[in-house]
Image (spheres, grey):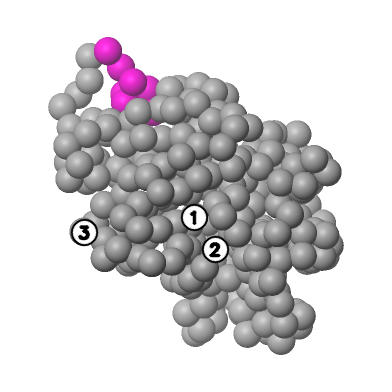
Amino acid sequence: MLNELNCMRVTLLGTGTSQGVPVIACQCDVCHSTDGRDNRLRSAIMIEEGSTRVIVDVGPDFRQQMLRQKVDNIDAILLTHEHADHIFGLDDIRSFNWIRKSAMDVYCEPRVQNNLKSIFNYVFATQKYPGTPQMNLIDLDSNAITIGSLTVQPIRVYHYQLPVYGFRVGNFAYLTDFNSIEDHELDKLAGVEILVICSLRKTSHISHLNLAEAIGLIERIKPRKAFLTHMSHEMGKHQDLLAELPAHIEPGYDGLIIDL
Ligand SMILES: [Zn+2]
Ligand SMILES: [Zn+2]
Ligand SMILES: [Zn+2]
């Protein structure tokens, strides 16, 4: 069982873009870096407070992330959107189904639920194969939800044209896979102290913030500290980025723990 935490703790489980870093077969310097911080699994975070533990996004590296952080139980999963790098680990929630002897609560919006029902059709079949993962899909909309001791406020962002949810929990916010946000949603981020925000690469992209755009949004939200995530190998090495960025902005890395 989780040792009860007095604070809220966020662990970056993965900080890489959809291909991860290193990229299969890539010969670049970043993909061959000997700095462990340049190895980036697909983006996901874990939020813990008291005895409550929530995972945001369950990509293809979920199994490895749970083993690496020695996670022995989780209470719920929040999904930002249905892209493969955010959901393709869901088959591995079976271990937690067995530990909890119950279905896993998976919070996502109706569109994402429809995608899950199609991609994981065997999970939702009327005649299930024994041992199939069990998910309890729960609607997510613009209203705050309560999971254990955590109050989670969804934040609407846009991934090119695809609506995606980011999340604010207390003075922490996690925003990934987007490149636009409306002012009334930005207002919901007032007072955020720690922000984890996507920054794909330095050059522009149709559906992700690049570094300059991420810095621009950080300057509007004004957190005490911002960590970059969902990074491509094109962002360069962690150490070089750290030297380039202002003191209040750091590249995130897998395993980074943030206590709030
Ligand atoms: Zn992604
Ligand atoms: Zn590379
Ligand atoms: Zn995406």
Residue wearing tag 3: 1
Of residue 171 and residue 18, the one placed in the foreground of this image is: 171
Query: Mark 2 = which residue?
Result: 15
| Residue 166 in the image: above or below residue 140 | below
- Circle 3: residue type: Met
Range shown magenta = 120-126
Asked if the stretch drawn in magenta spans residue 20, the answer is no
Would residue 112 appear left or right of 72 to someone viewing this image? right
Check disc 3 and report its element: helix, strand or loop. loop
Q: Is residue 19 visible?
A: no
Amino acid at dot 2: Thr
**Residue positioned 30% across, 17% down in the render:** 125
Q: Nearer the viewer, mark 3 or mark 2?
A: 3
Q: Earlier in the sequence, mark 3 or mark 1?
A: 3
Examine the image and state in which quarter residue 26 appears. bottom right
Q: Residue 10 at x, y = what percent?
A: 47, 63
All told, the count of numbered labels is: 3
Residue beneath disc 1: 44
Alpha carbon distance from label 2 to label 1: 7 Å
Quarter of the rendering containing residue 65: bottom left
Q: Residue at x 22, y 39 (%)?
A: 97
Q: Is residue 54 visible?
A: yes
Image quadrant in which the N terminus is located: bottom left
Q: Return the x and y of residue 187 as percentages of the image width and height.
A: 77, 47
Provide the secondary structure element on which disc 2 rests. Answer: loop
How would you rate the neighbour count of disc 3 (Cα within 10 Å): few for under 14, some for 14-19, many for 20 or more? few
Q: Earlier in the sequence, mark 3 or mark 2?
A: 3
- Figure check: 149 above or below 243: above
Q: Is residue 123 magenta?
A: yes
Reading the chain from its start, which is encountered first: label 2 or label 1?
Answer: 2
Decide which of 209, 106 is in the foreground and name it.
106
Amino acid type at circle 1 is Ala
